[in-house]
Image (cartoon, helix red, strand yellow):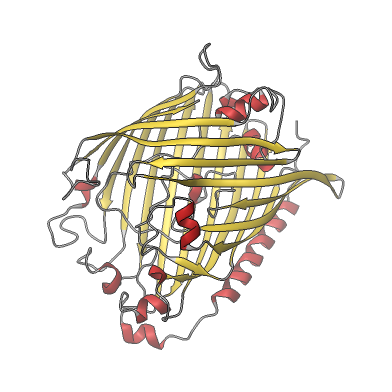
Amino acid sequence: MYNINSNRDVNAPCTTAGADSETIAASRPQRDFRAVATFGGVASLGAVVIGAGLLIKPPAASAVPSFARQTGQPCATCHTAFPELTPFGRRFKLGGYTMGGGLTFEEAPPIAAMLIPTFTHTERNQDSPPTPDTHTNNNTVLQQASVFYGGTIYGNLGAFIQGTYDRATQHVFLDNTDIRYADTTKLFGLDLLYGVSVNNNPSVQDVWNTTPAWGFPYIASTLAPQFAPPGTMIEGSLAGKVVGTGIYTFWNDMLYLEGSAYQNLSQQTLRVLGEPGISGSNSIGGAAPYWRAAFEYDLGEHSLEVGTFGMFANELPGRVPGFGFDQLLDVGFDAQYQYIGDPHSVTVKLTHIRENQQLNSTFFQGDSSNLYNTLESFRTSISYVYDHTYSLTAAYFSVYGSADAGLFGATSLANSPDGKGLIFDAAYLPFSKDGPSVWPWANARIGVSYTHYLKLFGGVNNFDGASHNASQNNTVFLYTWIAF
């Protein structure tokens, strides 16, 4: 289980547009987002529980090198093509990263490292270099270097902790972190796995590759494109800036339920952790609830998951006090189908997130033309892996929402956040089944990714009035992802 931080865009806008005019927006009745979140979460969980009751499951019969050393298993046991998890990999993570079977802690402490050298080319040169020491195009850089603690801490307590050097921000910081305790018991005569997770990125604790922290694309350039659609709050804007604690259960290898609460980290704490982009970043007030429910049905080589997730937060844009808080409610629905055979594997994923926004602070600061907005994000992908060695993925993404001159007028003639595109990725994984003899736990993914933008900020050509076309952001990205 890796993370290359592709979902953490500290500068991406998290809010979008709403009513057709300021007058109409301001006249709308105030909505209680907490009530909506509670009702939506309970209703969604209830639907999943009812679905679980309709099916009877038949009897049940890692890519971070430190996990492989600890379990004695090759990467292909936990991943179709890393970081995409198999049912076994999902249960390893839910079990708290503590499964043994390989080398002991004394023989091999759970430490690993990762390097990602990359090359990025865009269809048109960017207006200026993305960093002071790069070029407007054709950049070859060591995009990321990470050190991991991955595995058992003591007993049933384990962790995935990542420290990262990011080339784009030129910062070393505490990246995705998930520390958890897990155990098992019986409920109605069936196995019940339960646990506690402490983490710093909403959805990083999730085990399906349909939620934002581990969703496709698993790796993307941090130096391009120059323009990209905005994202919802849960799609990375809080990553590394909050700390959350939650409890979860997984009953009969079928029904997953989780409830968590996130708190803001102070600017002083973020500086100690090395977090980039603190100045002008958003923060949250009070506790922000997060929920997750999923139903997985496994039948031999096939598995199907359907679920929901979401989060509500009082957000302080730019950390500017005195204007109240923006209230953001994200509700997501997801589905995943996997066929894992020999030598063929296929994974199909779908995710839809709707964000309702009451932009109290943004509106009264004059940065939004509407008090109420919506933003929706849709992603779907299909991947094929042959012999755990060759991977092909095709994906479609779409972002759409309310028009807002205050939020998008500087970038969009249509005052719109709307964008869509296609992503194609091909990769070679030489060590999925066994590493080189000199270091059998090494892993690598060597690939090329192409992103084609069909629309950006509501337009195809000259979307911003400055002669920028959506296709000019098309990006070719070559990467070598090495872990050892």
Residue 394's x, y, as percent?
39, 38
- Identify which residue is drawn at 49% across, 84% down: 30
Residue at 39% from the left image edge and 74% from the top image edge = 320
In the depicted structure, whether residue 189 falls above or below residue 61? below
Q: Position of residue 222 (x, y in %)?
A: 33, 44
Farthest residue, direction left: 467
Question: What's the residue at 86%, 50% (across, down)?
Answer: 188
Q: Position of residue 239 (x, y in %)?
A: 48, 54
x 30%, y 42%: residue? 451
In the image, is 43 to the left or to the right of 376? right
Q: How many marks?
A: 0
In the displayed structure, does residue 64 sit left or right of residue 54?
left
In the image, is 397 to the left or to the right of 430? left
Q: In front: 134, or 122?
A: 134
Of residue 154 and residue 349, the one placed in the foreground of this image is 154
Task: Give the answer, above or below, for where 368 lies relative to 408.
Answer: below
Q: Quadrant of residue 412?
A: bottom left
Visible residue check, residue 311: yes
- Left or right: residue 322 compared with residue 339: left
